[in-house]
Image: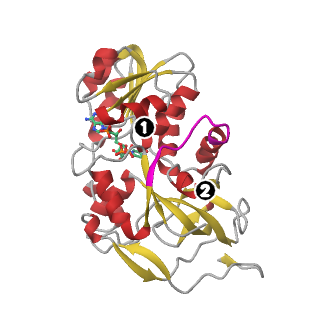
């Protein structure tokens, strides 16, 4: 139930949004006028200034791996016809059960459908936007940095002095994983393609490996591997780890079409029971409290969002095509409405 006060900003009857009826390519995205979302007691309504584009949005656009269609709709994203997870904007309505946020607060986090002028978001998935960031910078933080936090901090348990390998260091998750591991005092080696090695160095990596030229497993042994891309075999990961090292299986776009590579994570967990090394994935959690931890590091200047560039809402499909082509350095944002 929306809690209205005399100062509640007026939300228009329709808003501009990207909508999608069927799974497919970015050609399925169209700009339309639709009704703004209503909010539940535990949600707030955010006037979206900027949205972030991430791989999760690609998965929801294409409906791959197919297993996710069981949750989101068989032929199209019935439950979320407006794409976009990452949001940064201003709170314009507050659910009756929300005390952490007030009207006018500048927030960032994970919403349902951020490629729209208004987006509903659970208060538990939001944090206050760091004052030093633009909305576009803030919009590229939530999904990727939460995954990086859970990989590097919660699962990898990275400690000062450890040797850490980040595979996919130039991407959305990797750009945060690299900076987080460096901030925890690790000596980081970042893996990326030739054109993005300079970006990885600028994120604080002490060493870089060009995966098009060199095998990173020759650079071990590492105490922790944050495995975000390339789907390396478990034996290759083990070869690059110390005898008691940890590999955190975080992602990889080359997994099978049905489950997206869950099998590799399950095999890793099973194998870990019999060897000294830990090969583990994690179930991602959309936690505003994790985002608040990252926000503190952003406030301190320890973590800086790697924003490639931003696109207007009408060019969201162009942004997605660049992501699909592997051209994005870090992340891209979608500017939805002027702040
Ligand atoms: N578990 C979770 O919570 C979670 C959350 C978010 C994302 N993910 C998953 O994590 C993965 C990465 O997401 P992202 O947003 O970081 O994607 P992204 O922005 O597209 O970045 C992909 C990264 O992988 C690198 N890469 C591509 N091919 C590679 C290869 N063969 N060997 C080594 N590195 C390679 C890319 O390097 P270049 O660009 O330099 O080629 C880039 O650094 C996806 O599979 C995504 O679904 C998981």
Which quadrant of the view contains residue 321? Answer: bottom left
Q: Residue at x 50, y 17 (%)?
A: 162
Asked if disc 2 is less than 8 Å from ligand 1, the answer is: no
Residue contact at pointers 1 and 2, CB within 8 angstroms: no
Q: Residue drawn 66% across and 77% down?
A: 2
Q: Nearer the viewer, mark 1 or mark 2?
A: 1
- Expressed as whole percent of the image width and height from the top left, the position of residue 249 reads 37, 34
Q: Position of residue 240 (x, y in %)?
A: 32, 18
Position in image of residue 63 (x %, y %): 28, 61
Q: How is the image coloured?
A: secondary structure
Q: Write down the region rendered in magenta.
A: 298-309
Q: Which residue is mark 1?
A: 174
- Mark seen at residue 126: 2
Residue lying at 52% horizontally and 49% vertically, measured from the top left: 141
Label 2 residue SS: strand
Residue 44 drawn at (x, y percent)? 62, 68
């Amino acid at each position: 139930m929306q809690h209205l006060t005399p100062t509640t900003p007026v939300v228009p009857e329709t808003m501009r949004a990207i909508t999608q009826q069927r799974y497919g390519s970015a050609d399925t995205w169209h700009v339309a006028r639709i009704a703004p979302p209503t909010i539940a007691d535990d949600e707030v309504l955010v006037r979206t200034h900027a949205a972030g584009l991430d791989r999760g949005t690609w998965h929801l656009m294409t409906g791959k791996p197919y297993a996710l269609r069981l949750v989101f709709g068989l032929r199209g994203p019935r439950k979320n016809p407006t794409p976009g997870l990452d949001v940064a904007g201003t709170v314009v309505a507050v659910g009756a059960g929300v005390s952490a946020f007030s009207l006018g607060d500048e927030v960032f986090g994970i919403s349902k459908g951020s490629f729209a002028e208004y987006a509903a978001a659970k208060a538990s998935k939001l944090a206050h936007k760091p004052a030093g960031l633009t909305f576009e910078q803030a919009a590229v933080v939530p999904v990727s940095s939460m995954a990086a936090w859970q990989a590097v901090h919660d699962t990898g348990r990275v400690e000062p002095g450890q040797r850490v390998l980040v595979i996919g260091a130039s991407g959305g998750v990797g750009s945060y994983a690299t900076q987080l591991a460096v901030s925890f005092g690790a000596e980081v080696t970042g893996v990326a393609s030739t054109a993005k090695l300079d970006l990885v160095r600028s994120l604080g990596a002490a060493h870089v490996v060009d995966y098009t030229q060199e095998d990173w497993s020759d650079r071990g042994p590492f105490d922790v591997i944050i495995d975000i891309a390339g789907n390396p075999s478990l034996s290759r990961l083990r070869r690059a780890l110390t005898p008691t090292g940890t590999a955190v299986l975080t992602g990889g776009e080359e997994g099978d079409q049905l489950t997206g590579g869950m099998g590799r994570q399950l095999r890793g967990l099973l194998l870990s029971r019999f060897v000294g090394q830990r090969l583990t994935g994690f179930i991602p959690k959309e936690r505003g409290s994790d985002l608040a931890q990252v926000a503190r590091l952003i406030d301190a200047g320890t973590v800086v969002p790697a924003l490639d560039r931003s696109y207007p809402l009408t060019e969201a499909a162009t942004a997605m095509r660049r992501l699909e082509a592997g051209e994005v350095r870090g992340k891209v944002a979608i500017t939805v409405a002027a702040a």
